[in-house]
Image: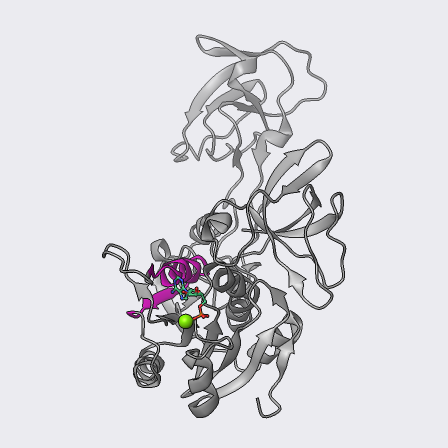
Amino acid sequence: MDGRPYFISVEEARTICNTTPVQPNAEHLPLDRCIGRVLAEDLTSKVDDPPFDNSAMDGFACKFDSEATYPLSLNIVGLQAATGENEALTLRDGEAVHIMTGAPMPPGADAILPIERCEVAGQYVRLLEPPKPHFVRKKGENLEQGAVALSKGQHLTPSRVGLCATMGYDTLPVYTRLNIGIVSTGDELKPPGQPLNHGEIYESNSFGLAGLVEWAGHTPVRFPSVADSMDALRQTLDEAAKTCDIILTSGGVSMGEFDYVRRLMEEEGDVHFWRMKIRPGSPPLFGLWKETPLFGLPGNPVSSHVVFRMLVAPYLRHSLSTDAPKEWKVRARLCDPVKSTNDCITLRRVTLVSTDEGMMAHQPRHQGSGNIESLASADGLTLLQPGQSGEVGTWVDVLVL
Ligand code: AMP
Ligand code: MG
């Protein structure tokens, strides 16, 4: 390894990856294409929200009178729809306006009584109780014009896109999605759908990894899987480096005779570290292939998934200065024993059950790193720290899948 960092902690591995971040570009997109993107600039509101005082209820608008006794009859002098057609109407004592939710408050009115507490008889309305000033939504009470409502790096969730429309934006400055190449390696891999010969297995990692890339908000570029050969691998990595911002490989980074990703990276690429203290998933490497950041993920399906979550996703978040997609950790009590180690973080697949005593973590499946079914049926991964006890009853952090 020529003095390159070897078998390092997850924190050290993340720090090393972060020294060569990818630089995303910004683009302007129509609002309806911004879901899931990351904001590239702070956004200030172009308007007050709401832009005018309006009613929070269907009911009657009138003047609040602390001296009045109820029920109280008022003369209905108009109908105020949400479009505010009657804006010129000014209310006087003894008068009320039939008002719809969202309609501008008529000048002179400062309280609303919901329709359910009103009795209408011809030109008159009987208020059964005092009208409520708090049913008036005041101009700018949610957001004032010029206020920064969303900041650079924030993930555009559906509610945030709705907020942008409310603030008057029809396009947004967002980071471009990164193109992330996915290269599976192994002579034994067959694409699903074809018959298997003895010794072959279906190639699954590229599909799972492509899903994780999309989950992280980027564009997966799946390459056909590559045989265990230096030449074939070199050719595919060269092609991926030309067209992609980042390359993920799977397989070929352990100690095996045919682990050519590691060999090629050591001989012709630039390895920044190899092996990380997590279980499963200890063999990853990170480095540059022709200037393009490359994550050499382990071949075992559970390991490649776990390493994406623990290493690639934090790197993507760091590169875009965003906290999205958010990683949720919950505290859960172990209901089955988990074997910890003294040097690695132990990530066991658990199912979670919410109980009156808190969250309970069960480990119903065998934990082999080739057992993708155990990942597919799990809710989370234990984050058992090096040396931490994994006895039944221990409270541990669990990364929600
Ligand atoms: P490797 O790291 O190349 O030795 O692979 C470790 C294990 O993961 C072996 O059992 C491989 O057959 C399996 N494996 C490697 N790549 C894939 C893949 N893309 N899909 C499914 N299994 C894989
Ligand atoms: Mg292999």
**Which region is colored magenta?**
201-224
Question: Going 50% across and 51% down the picture, which residue do you hit?
Answer: 375
Question: Going 55% across and 49% down the picture, which residue do you hit?
Answer: 366
Viewer-side residue, 39 vs 335: 335
Work out which quarter of the rendered image holds the N terminus and state it.
bottom right
Give how far across and how far down residue 195 sits, in percent.
23, 56
Give how far across and how far down residue 215 sits, in percent.
44, 57
Q: Look at the image and tell me whether residue 232 can be seen.
A: yes
- Farthest residue in the top direction? 121
Q: Is residue 197 magenta?
A: no
Viewer-side residue, 208 vs 323: 208
Residue 295, above or below 105:
below
Residue 236, above or below 337:
below
Q: Is residue 214 magenta?
A: yes
- Farthest residue in the front direction? 198
Is 333 on the left-hand or right-hand side of 255?
A: right
Give how far across and how far down residue 143 sits, in percent.
57, 50
Give how far across and how far down residue 152 sits, in percent.
53, 66
Residue 129: quadrant of the picture: top right
Chosen colour scheme: one colour
Q: Quadrant of ligand 2?
A: bottom left
Report how many numbered discs are placed on residues in the image.
0
Residue 70, above or below 5:
above
Is 328 on the left-hand or right-hand side of 177?
A: right
Viewer-side residue, 393 vs 69: 393
Q: Look at the image and tell me whether residue 110 can be seen.
A: no
Is 336 on the left-hand or right-hand side of 394?
A: left
- Farthest residue in the left direction? 194
Residue 232: quadrant of the picture: bottom left
Question: Going 67% across and 22% down the picture, which residue do you hit?
Answer: 65
Is 192 on the left-hand or right-hand side of 55?
A: left
